[in-house]
Image (tube, rainbow, N blue to C red):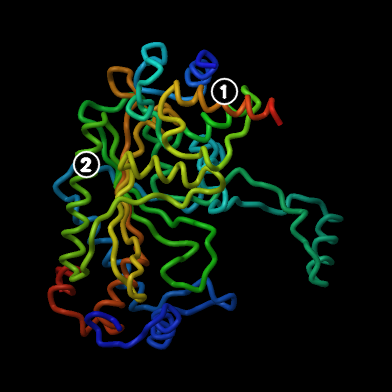
């Protein structure tokens, strides 16, 4: 049962049914990709703007990107080392008329037609911060005191599921900090506090907890162990539909000098920079609002509406 | 074995201190070895020393110091030799 809305549901499937019934989500035939109704989109946009208002006191460079990055950036980031199962590479037909004819014939009879697809020079963006690192590195050494970018992008993770809390493509808004270790760790602490304050403003009972990423393969538990022991990842959790199952709606990460060595990010003194980011999944936060406050935004608590639409 | 481990650390990962300044028992994680570096490090160790770390050794402690890495590889080589 939703904590505040009074809607009764015990499972993700029932939650999803409500979202569909209220015209908030429109499942496509596969059932794991959604279109969004007007009210969902309005709340998602308001959440997006609310995150932006949280850094108003900071000096921040605002950037938004399409959901693709150059393949070279993807390769340099070494995302494939840790998450090959989540990455989405973009392939296209690059053949001649004969290859086209064969591809159409294969498709017509339900055979595999994908052999004619070749990799392009782009890869789907795994996180909104990925296009930021090479851009900042291209400018030369960081300014004294570091730099902060507010980055937005649609992101892709190959995790097909009808669960609307686990979308394959979703909007992410990330604050990315560049500087020395002290500077970026201070940034991360600030954003953990800001995130908890934002969730509180939205009457969402969030908590923070050390976490680790979903690493791939035989290195997974080792990497998770090290990531956790070095406190590199802190997630902002909410109890969502299923009792006892926490859902991450925000993530504050310290990368040490990983992206700096990958892309050549330097401090003025020549040392490699350190980086940290604070990211929020827009759709997940939006779904949390519908879960906690009900499926009709007009009936949400005044304080929540004021936080989302302050000029109302 | 220790020299091989030092060479690989030097080439494969970026630590916050020179590898030459590290003792056998100095904590590599404190010296900047991160979760991002581990695949590179382990892949290079396996390739150069011709061993494969079993899942049981895929724990944080195995790679915590140059001494522990060297001991683990020595043990794996001995087991390989016996088999």
Residue A173: x and y, percent?
33, 54
Answer whether labels 2 and 1 touch (C-beta < 8 Å): no
Q: Nearer the viewer, residue A112 or A45?
A: A112
Tell me the subunit letter for badge 1.
B
Q: Decide if residue A74 is on the left or right side of residue A201.
A: right
Q: Decide if residue A3 is on the left or right side of residue B13.
A: left
State which quarter of the image contains the C terminus of chain B: top right
Residue A245: x and y, percent?
36, 68
Q: What residue lies at 55% left-to-right and 42% top-to-bottom?
A: B55
Q: What residue lies at 44% left-to-right and 21% top-to-bottom?
A: B66
Q: What residue lies at 15% left-to-right and 66% top-to-bottom?
A: A201
Q: Nearer the viewer, mark 2 or mark 1?
A: 1
> Does label 1 lie on the same chain as label 2?
no
Asked which quadrant contains residue A158, the reply is bottom right
Judge the density around disc 1: few (<14), some (14-19), many (≥20) Cα neighbours within 10 Å: some
B67 versus A128 height, above or below: above
Q: Nearer the viewer, residue A198 or B11?
A: B11
A144 versus A310 height, above or below: above
Per the image, the residue denoted by label 2 is A187
Judge the density around disc 2: few (<14), some (14-19), many (≥20) Cα neighbours within 10 Å: many
Residue A136: x and y, percent?
36, 34
Per the image, the residue denoted by label 1 is B74
Q: What residue lies at 30% left-to-right and 77% top-to-bottom?
A: A290
Tell me the subunit letter for badge 2.
A
Q: Decide if residue B58 is on the left or right side of residue A107.
A: left
Q: Nearer the viewer, residue A147 or A181?
A: A181
């Amino acid at each position: 049962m939703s904590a505040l809305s009074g809607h009764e549901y015990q499972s993700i499937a029932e939650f999803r049914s409500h979202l569909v019934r209220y015209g908030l989500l429109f499942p496509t035939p596969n059932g794991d990709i959604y279109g969004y109704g007007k009210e969902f989109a309005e709340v998602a946009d308001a959440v997006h703007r609310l995150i932006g208002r949280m850094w108003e006191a900071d000096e921040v460079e605002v950037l938004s990107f399409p959901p693709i990055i150059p393949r070279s950036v993807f390769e340099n980031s070494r995302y494939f080392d840790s998450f090959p199962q989540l990455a989405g590479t973009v392939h296209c037909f690059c053949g001649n008329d004969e290859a086209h004819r064969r591809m159409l014939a294969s498709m017509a009879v339900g055979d595999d037609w994908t052999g004619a697809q070749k990799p392009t020079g782009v890869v789907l963006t795994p996180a909104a911060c990925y296009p930021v690192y090479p851009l900042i590195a291209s400018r030369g050494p960081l300014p004294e005191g570091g730099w902060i970018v507010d980055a937005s992008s649609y992101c892709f993770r190959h995790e097909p599921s009808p669960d609307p809390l686990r979308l394959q493509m979703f909007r992410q808004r990330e604050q990315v900090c560049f500087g020395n270790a002290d500077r970026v760790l201070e940034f991360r602490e600030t954003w953990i506090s800001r995130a908890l304050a934002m969730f509180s403003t939205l009457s969402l009972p969030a908590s923070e907890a050390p976490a680790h990423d979903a690493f791939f393969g035989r290195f997974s538990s080792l990497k998770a162990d090290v990531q956790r022991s070095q406190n590199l990842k802190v997630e902002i959790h909410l109890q969502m539909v299923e009792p006892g199952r926490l859902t991450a709606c925000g993530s504050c990460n310290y990368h040490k000098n990983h992206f700096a060595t990958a892309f050549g990010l330097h401090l003025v003194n020549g040392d490699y920079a350190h980086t940290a980011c604070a990211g929020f999944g827009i759709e997940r936060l939006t779904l949390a609002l519908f879960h906690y406050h009900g499926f009709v935004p007009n009936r949400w608590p005044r304080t929540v509406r004021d936080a989302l639409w302050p000029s109302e | 074995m220790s020299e091989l481990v030092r060479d690989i650390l030097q080439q494969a990962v970026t630590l916050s201190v020179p590898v030459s300044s590290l003792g056998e028992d100095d904590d590599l994680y404190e010296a900047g070895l991160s979760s991002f570096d581990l695949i590179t490090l382990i892949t290079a160790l396996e390739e150069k020393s011709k061993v494969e770390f079993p899942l049981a050794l895929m724990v944080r402690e195995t790679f915590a110091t140059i001494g522990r890495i060297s001991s683990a590889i020595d043990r794996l080589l001995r087991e390989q030799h016996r088999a």
